[in-house]
Image (spheres, coloured by chain):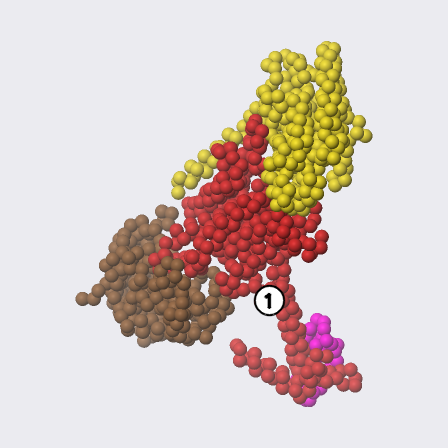
Chain colours: A brown, B yellow, C red
């Protein structure tokens, strides 16, 4: 019987009386690599933020390894969307990655040699170590994504929550990130990723959650990633990708909840 | 947050309330038959109530401690002015922010009189850095101020010819008092040796006083308190005080004392101890009911303060 | 006034020393903390806060009847803080955006403050506070004890900033991420805002309510032009602020009737303009130069290729053509001759006795190389 990394119960989040997430019951077992998919406005980012206790919830609770998320900060690493920060901020790549160690440092203490080394190691893993002293505004989209990844890696967390880490990233970078994620899973970590590309779900992930304000389905990809479920999630014409067929998913009718 | 909405509402309510009219100073008589007069400075209000006696009801807009250069009329003031029968103001841009209002009142048919019109222009001073504007502080040369009595008297007679004899009599009586006052001031001034007659104040309000009674006068700010004194001005004044060993400098009731305190600190840092010789009434009189609450009392207070302080010679 | 006499006065003349010190303290504190306001895109918050402080000063006087700097500063700080809270709650609970909320609070509070000043000016007691001097400041009236107060409070602010350096960096760059690390980002936000309010009220006596926002925004904006490191930016910002303060005091000391506060603001404005134009990486002037150089280079390449394409229709690639023909095929609206001369210098073209131009061997090779490069980049 595997342990549950994340347990979400009755989660409801509303923005100005409009529901963004409605009555979500979700269990994420330890050690899976899970994709959260759904149309625009489905609440995917909100779900991640709710698990991290970054948004106010109208109802429900979240448990990380059985305890509340505020007690388990050390165990969770967050990779936000690229667009959530101003990349014109005067700081270097290495500096951003070191921010991942601020939690371990605690109050007031400044990062030192140890933190620098850990940062370089993480940058190495994502293939960005030669950019360590580069100003972050000079990075391409894919490079920025990898910096955020490195920042989360340096936390050495047990659970990683990532919001669209493949957005606007070129094919090589995407492959590199995927193998990194799979490495994490192999070492027993739990990785939850908000993913936008239905085509690659079966290839990259072993678990998936289909979301459109309500939970449509959640479980192993083989069981849950079906045409019926997708139609329920996206509510429109969806030509389903068969594993060996290679047809693309086209014309997703992305209706918002 | 609903709370903040109520707070905003409360703020708006307070603002509206504070905009409602408030009254100026109390009228000098409660006679409803009296001519309704509004005056700007306390000195003018005082004069008009003396010359007009019980025939007039005078309200002054600017009370003690009020700076006429910066005074902005409120809606309540404008309401008062528009109900007046006669309006008296100083003129020569003393009430720097009210010029348009006076024009407005004239257009509405209210007789608006600048008492300084009674002074022959050749007696007026125009300081070099104020290009074309006269120094408006005409009330400190008692002789010159006496010339304005005639203007007030004539305006009253024009409005109320039936009582012309009354106005003539009270004007004459007042002029005689002013003549005595003039003599007193000259006397006191003369009691100071000439080299001690240097008067340093917060702004150039005393030029006519200086010329009339033989004082050298320097103010930190110019003839209007609207200009901000610069560092150079403070330094220059401090240098002069130390050089000439002037024992006392003066603050004014209607001007914040900070600048004079800064000058004093600068002087003290040069090793010379200058005291603040006292508070002078420059653009406003004292509190009503006190001896300095009328023109004559105010002038006496000023000259006594000045002469006593300068006559003593430096003590802390 | 001679410069040497001026410098001498800076140290030995009480007035100049006091004013310059006070202005320098103001510059340092507002420069340092203003960096955060600018980086968090809250520059105008400084403006709103300083305008909002006006009713606070008036109410402090009305309640206590005192003209003591410390009391008025306290009133200013409280009002500035309340104004900020208002802005935040308006943004949170209505559809009004941040800048509109700022404008709203700024004008309402400031208007309220002016109303209060008008009311105060009517009061019968003869001790007027000179509160309207807070509109534009009265730097020349700074006393030593004022500067000491400013210095102590300013030191506290700077010290706090340095203690919580990494926390504030986190707050400004990625507050959400900071929250996931377990830091109380709301509290840190409140702390940082308090420090900014402190910086602003310190400066109110010197430059006044209306101009204070310049001292919060300008030094940081100028500093950003010169560096890509937060630490350097904050340091530079403080230095720029201090320079503006001291130079402003010096200028005001050498010219009569020059108000100190506005002069300081003028100085920092000059620093900003110079930084905008001449800072090495981001300066507009260098951008313009670089663009000119690029344009020139592109033009030369275009002419070279124009010659090549003309030559292609002949057997001999070195067939000459006239300048007029080159102009016609639109290799460049003007400056064809200039580009040709440059190409000649590089040995890529040669001129004939008939005033025509032809490619050299080297020129032909260059064109081919350029074409290959372009394909490679696609």
Q: Residue furthest left?
A: A1
Residue B256, image quadrant: top right
Reply yes or no: does residue B134 show up in magenta. Answer: no
* Rendering coords of residue B298 (x, y %): 65, 24
Q: Does C40 sit above or below residue B142?
A: below
Residue highlighted by disc 1: C280
* Rendering coords of residue B225 (x, y %): 65, 37
Q: Nearer the viewer, residue B176 or B17?
A: B176
- The quadrant the C terminus of chain A occupies is bottom left
Q: Which residues are magenta?
A: C312-340
Q: Residue furthest right?
A: B122
Label 1 resides on the chain identified as C
Q: Residue at x 67, y 39 (%)?
A: B220
* Rendering coords of residue B163 (x, y %): 72, 11
Reply yes or no: does residue C325 show up in magenta. Answer: yes
- The quadrant the N terminus of chain A occupies is bottom left
Q: Nearer the viewer, residue B171 or A153?
A: B171
C78 relative position to B305: left or right: left
* Rendering coords of residue A124 (x, y %): 40, 75
Give the secondary structure at mark 1: loop
B281 relative position to C113: left or right: right
Q: Residues within 10 Å of mark 1 (few under 14, many from 20)?
A: some
Residue C341, image quadrant: bottom right
Q: Nearer the viewer, residue C342 or C47?
A: C47
Q: Does C325 sit above or below residue C50?
A: below
């Amino acid at each position: 019987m595997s342990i549950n990394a994340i347990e979400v119960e009755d989660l409801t989040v509303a923005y100005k009386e409009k529901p963004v997430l409605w009555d979500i019951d979700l269990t994420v077992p330890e050690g899976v690599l899970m994709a959260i998919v759904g149309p625009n406005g489905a609440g995917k980012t909100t779900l991640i933020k709710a698990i991290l206790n970054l948004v106010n919830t109208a109802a429900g609770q979240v448990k990380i390894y059985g305890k509340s998320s505020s007690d388990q900060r050390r165990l969770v690493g967050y990779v936000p969307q690229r667009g959530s920060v101003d990349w014109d901020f005067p700081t270097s790549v290495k500096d951003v990655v070191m921010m991942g160690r601020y939690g371990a440092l605690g109050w007031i203490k400044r990062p030192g040699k140890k933190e620098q080394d850990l940062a370089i190691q993480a940058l190495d893993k994502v293939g960005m170590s030669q950019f360590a002293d580069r100003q972050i505004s000079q990075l391409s989209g894919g490079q920025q994504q990898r910096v955020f990844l490195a920042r989360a890696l340096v936390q050495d967390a047990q659970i990683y929550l990532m919001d669209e880490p493949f957005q606007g990233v070129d094919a090589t970078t995407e492959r590199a990130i995927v193998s990194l994620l799979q490495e994490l899973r192999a070492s027993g970590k739990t990785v939850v990723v908000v993913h936008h590309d239905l085509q690659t779900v079966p290839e990259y992930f072993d678990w998936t959650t289909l979301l459109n304000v309500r939970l449509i389905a959640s479980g192993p990809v083989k069981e849950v990633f079906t045409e019926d479920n997708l139609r329920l999630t996206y509510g429109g014409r969806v030509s389903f990708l068969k594993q060996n067929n290679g047809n693309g998913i086209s014309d997703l009718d992305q209706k918002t909840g | 947050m609903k709370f903040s909405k109520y707070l905003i509402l409360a703020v708006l309510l307070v603002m509206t309330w504070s905009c409602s009219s408030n009254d100026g100073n109390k009228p000098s008589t409660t006679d409803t038959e009296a001519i309704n007069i509004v005056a700007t400075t306390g000195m003018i209000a005082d004069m008009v109530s003396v010359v007009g006696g019980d025939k007039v009801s005078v309200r002054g807009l600017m009370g003690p401690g009020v700076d006429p250069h910066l005074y902005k009329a409120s809606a309540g003031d404008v309401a008062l002015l528009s109900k007046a029968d006669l309006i008296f103001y100083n003129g020569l841009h003393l009430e720097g922010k009210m010029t348009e209002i006076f024009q407005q009142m004239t257009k509405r048919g209210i007789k608006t009189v600048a008492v300084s019109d009674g002074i022959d222009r050749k007696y007026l001073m125009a300081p070099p850095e104020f290009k074309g504007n006269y120094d408006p502080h005409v009330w400190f040369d008692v002789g010159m101020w006496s010339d304005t009595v005639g203007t007030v008297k004539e305006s009253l007679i024009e409005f109320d010819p039936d009582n012309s004899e009354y106005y003539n009599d009270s004007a004459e009586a007042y002029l005689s008092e002013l003549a005595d006052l003039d003599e007193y001031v000259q006397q006191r001034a003369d009691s100071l040796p000439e080299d001690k007659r240097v008067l340093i104040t917060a702004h150039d309000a005393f030029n006519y006083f200086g010329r009339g009674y033989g004082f050298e006068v320097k103010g930190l700010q110019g003839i209007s308190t609207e200009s901000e004194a610069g560092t150079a001005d403070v330094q220059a004044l401090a240098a002069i005080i130390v050089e000439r060993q002037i024992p006392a400098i003066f603050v004014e009731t209607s001007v914040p004392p900070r600048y004079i305190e800064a000058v004093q600190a600068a002087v003290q840092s040069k090793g010379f101890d200058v005291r603040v010789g006292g508070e002078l009434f420059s653009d406003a009189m004292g509190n009503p009911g006190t001896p300095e609450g009328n023109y004559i009392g105010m002038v006496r207070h000023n000259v006594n303060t000045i002469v006593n302080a300068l006559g003593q010679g430096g003590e802390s | 006034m001679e410069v040497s006499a001026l410098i001498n006065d800076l140290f030995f003349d009480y007035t100049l020393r006091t004013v310059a010190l006070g202005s320098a303290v103001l510059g340092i504190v507002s420069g340092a903390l203003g960096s955060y306001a600018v980086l968090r895109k809250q520059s105008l918050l400084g403006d709103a806060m300083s305008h909002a402080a006006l009713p606070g000063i008036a109410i402090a006087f009305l309640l206590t009847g005192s003209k003591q700097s410390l009391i008025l500063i306290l009133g200013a700080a409280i009002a500035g803080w309340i104004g900020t809270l208002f802005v935040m709650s308006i943004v949170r609970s209505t559809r009004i955006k941040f800048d509109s909320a700022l404008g709203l609070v700024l004008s309402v509070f400031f208007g309220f403050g002016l109303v209060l000043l008008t009311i105060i000016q009517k009061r019968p007691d003869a001790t007027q506070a000179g509160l309207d001097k807070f509109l534009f400041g009265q730097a020349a009236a700074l006393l030593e004890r004022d500067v000491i107060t400013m210095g102590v409070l300013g030191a506290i602010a700077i010290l706090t900033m340095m203690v919580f350096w990494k926390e504030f960096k986190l707050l400004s760059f990625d507050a959400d991420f900071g929250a996931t690390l377990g830091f109380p980002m709301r509290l840190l936000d409140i702390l940082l805002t308090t420090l900014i309010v402190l910086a602003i009220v310190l400066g109110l006596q010197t430059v006044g309510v209306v101009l204070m926002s310049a001292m919060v925004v300008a030094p940081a904006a100028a500093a950003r032009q010169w560096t890509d490191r937060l630490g350097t930016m904050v340091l530079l910002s403080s230095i720029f602020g201090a320079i503006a303060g001291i130079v402003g005091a010096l200028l005001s000391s050498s010219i009569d009737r020059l108000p100190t506060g506005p002069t300081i603001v003028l100085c920092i404005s000059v620093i900003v303009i110079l930084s905008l134009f001449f800072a090495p990486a981001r300066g507009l002037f260098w951008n313009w130069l670089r663009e000119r150089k690029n344009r020139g280079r592109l033009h030369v390449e275009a002419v070279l290729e124009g010659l090549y394409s003309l030559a292609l229709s002949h057997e001999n690639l070195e067939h000459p053509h006239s300048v007029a023909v080159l102009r016609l095929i639109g290799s460049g609206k003007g400056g064809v001759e200039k580009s040709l001369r440059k190409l000649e210098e590089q040995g890529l073209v040669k001129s004939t006795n008939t005033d025509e131009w032809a490619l050299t061997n080297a020129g032909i090779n260059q064109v081919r190389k350029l074409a290959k490069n372009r394909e490679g980049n696609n």
